[in-house]
Amino acid sequence: MTDTVFILVANYGSLALFVITFLSCLAVPVPASLMMLTGGAFAASGDLVLITASLSAYGGALSGDQTGFLVGRSCARALERWAEARRSRARLLSRARASIDEWGGVGVFLSRWLISPFGPYVNFASGAGRMRWARFSAWSAAGEVVWVGMYVGLGYMFADSLTAVAEFAADLSGLIAGGVVAVGLGLWLRVMQRRHGRAGRKSPQRVSRD
């Protein structure tokens, strides 16, 4: 995988960064984090311009977020069918909705970088849930600054140890993914408790006539 990423960046440069980050924000399983690390390393060696590499990755991420949001907004039923075709996708989409219900825009921000495997599903859920476009866009843009800056910056600073940094990033992503499952389940349970609580308060109480 690492060799393939090196070849893509060497041959296509910043265009590869744009395309891969774009696809990653639409739940396509591509190595976006490794690609950005590699882009940063190539910038450190002078093969890429740092600002161009960063803006390309950032532009791809923003474009992917906006596309995912529009898909959720305009194709909600098709999105449901797509998610239900695989249990893992259905779970992620359900947890994404729970995070939006619980945290709103902050959930969008955190899903860009802290729990990035969650991000594409938050894009879909935000659109389907009718979150205001301006609110989504603001939190998305802020979060992608952190995500892109973190990975391109790490690649730039540790270019001589890129393989070790990539392995660390992969391990970290695995830990975060495990955390997503736990956090998502907790959020879902909390939302369900609140809904049941509201339903209980709204139900009419029977008055005994005895």
Image (cartoon, rainbow, N blue to C red):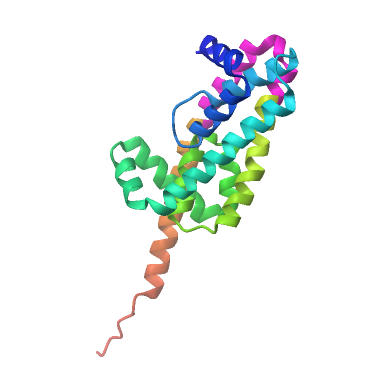
Q: How many marks?
A: 0
Does the magenta run of residues contain 22? Answer: no
Q: Is residue 30 above or below residue 209?
A: above
Residue 49 image point, x, y percent: 73, 22
Residue 108 in sight here: yes
Look at the magenta stretch and give its main secondary structure: helix
Residue 167 in sight here: no
User: Residue lying farthest left?
Assistant: 210
> The C terminus is located in which quarter?
bottom left
User: Residue lying farthest bottom?
Assistant: 209
Residue 139 image point, x, y percent: 62, 49
Residue 185 relative to residue 207: left or right: right
- Report the magenta residues as a range: 153-176
Does the magenta run of residues contain 154? Answer: yes
- Which quadrant holds residue 41? top right
Q: Please report the residue visible at 58 percent of the width from the left and 12 percent of the height from the top.
A: 6
Q: Please report the residue visible at 58 percent of the width from the left and 29 percent of the height from the top.
A: 18
**Frontmost residue, 108 versus 192:** 108
**Frontmost residue, 135 versus 46:** 46
Q: Please report the residue visible at 58 percent of the width from the left and 21 percent of the height from the top.
A: 35
**Frontmost residue, 3 versus 170:** 3
Q: Is residue 115 above or below residue 32?
A: below
- Which quadrant holds residue 90? top left
Residue 77 relative to residue 5: left or right: left
Residue 84 image point, x, y percent: 30, 42
Q: Is residue 77 above or below residue 90?
A: below
Q: Please report the residue visible at 67 percent of the width from the left and 36 percent of the height from the top.
A: 146
